[in-house]
Image: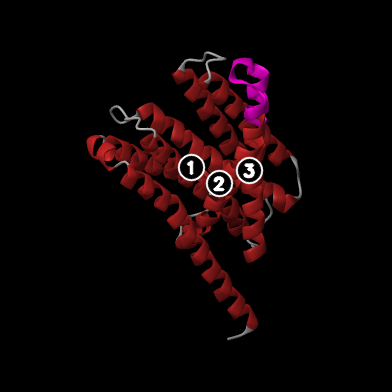
Amino acid sequence: MTSPDRAIVRDRRLDVVIAVLALLLSVGGLVRVMLAKQAFVAENPQNVLWIALALAAGGATFFANGFVALRGRTLLWAGYGTFAMLAAFNLQGLVNGSIVRAVPAAERGVLIYLVLGIGAGACQTFGKWLMVRVLGRVHRPTRRADLLATGLAVGLGFGLSEVLFIGGQVIAAGTPITGLGLIGIWERTAAVGFHVYSAGLIAIAIALGRWWPLVLVLVVHSLEDWLAGAVGAGVMHVPIVLLETIYTAATLLLWVLFRRAARALPE
């Protein structure tokens, strides 16, 4: 076996290891919560159904990319996205946790939630950027489809892992899902799509050495998290349907910009 062949085999093995670890961490965390809350899960099986539907609906947003087919390799690469999510959420806990501890809840106004939104947007954008860079360094893609796949796969893994994480939090809190939780599924679908196409734009930014896609992703993500935090805390009042419509519009914006930028990317 020649050296290039050995390198390819080594890199594929690394992909498998990353994917297995990602699966153990994301699914294992949910299973651990479900085992700890067995009685609640038995009484509220719709919570598990909600997670499954959110995963399916969110994952389906990947197919709208128009450039990359969902193949075994892409699914393996999604494991890097799980680690992007873990890195981002831990960093976000440190950054935003410090702000939350410094400012009492009664003193948190719109401006503080804007700062927290920027903190969340910056940490999550950095997590995706970091893992897209790592994946690019491992495989050094040269074809347009492969380069785009690094970003899209990281975004897919990030978004689906976040669904499992949030679903686990809901179960851990003992909050039953009423009906199918369609508003929540709508929100998660838009969120996964956002992660997929924001990471796709980040991959294009890295490939072309341009800053505008990164800045765009950071700004849109920060505004989304600002709205989510402020509305959740009752500082701002936005009807839930309007809020989800805004999130969906943001996802569609990134999708359109990704498609345009990907089409202009040299082969």
Residue drawn where x is 32% and y is 36% of the image = 47
> What quarter of the picture does the N terminus occupy?
bottom right
Residue drawn where x is 37% and y is 44% of the image = 33
In the image, what residue type sits under mark 3?
Leu
> Which residue occupies the foreground of this view, 81 or 139?
81
Residue drawn where x is 59% and y is 20% of the image = 105
Residue extending furthest toward the bottom: 1
Q: CA distance from mark 3 to mark 2?
A: 10 Å
Mark 1–mark 2 contact, CB under 8 Å? yes
SS at mark 2? helix
Q: Which residue is mark 2?
A: 85
In the image, what residue type sits under mark 1?
Glu
Q: Which residue is mark 1?
A: 162
Q: Label 2 neighbourhood size at 10 Å, few (<14), some (14-19), many (20+)? A: many
SS at mark 1? helix
Q: CA distance from mark 1 to mark 2?
A: 7 Å
Name the spot of residue 55 as percent of width and height, x first: 40, 43
> What quarter of the picture does the C terminus occupy?
bottom right
Q: Is residue 37 above or below residue 134?
A: above
SS at mark 3? helix
Disc number lying in front (1 or 3):
3
252 falls in the magenta region:
no
Q: Please give the range of residues in magenta.
A: 100-118
- Tell how many labels: 3
In the image, what residue type sits under mark 2?
Met
Mark 1–mark 3 contact, CB under 8 Å? no
Q: Is residue 45 visible?
A: no
> Which residue occupies the foreground of this view, 86 or 106?
106
> Which residue occupies the foreground of this view, 252 or 188?
188
Name the spot of residue 86 as percent of width and height, x first: 55, 48
Q: Which residue is mark 3?
A: 91
Residue extending furthest toward the left: 43
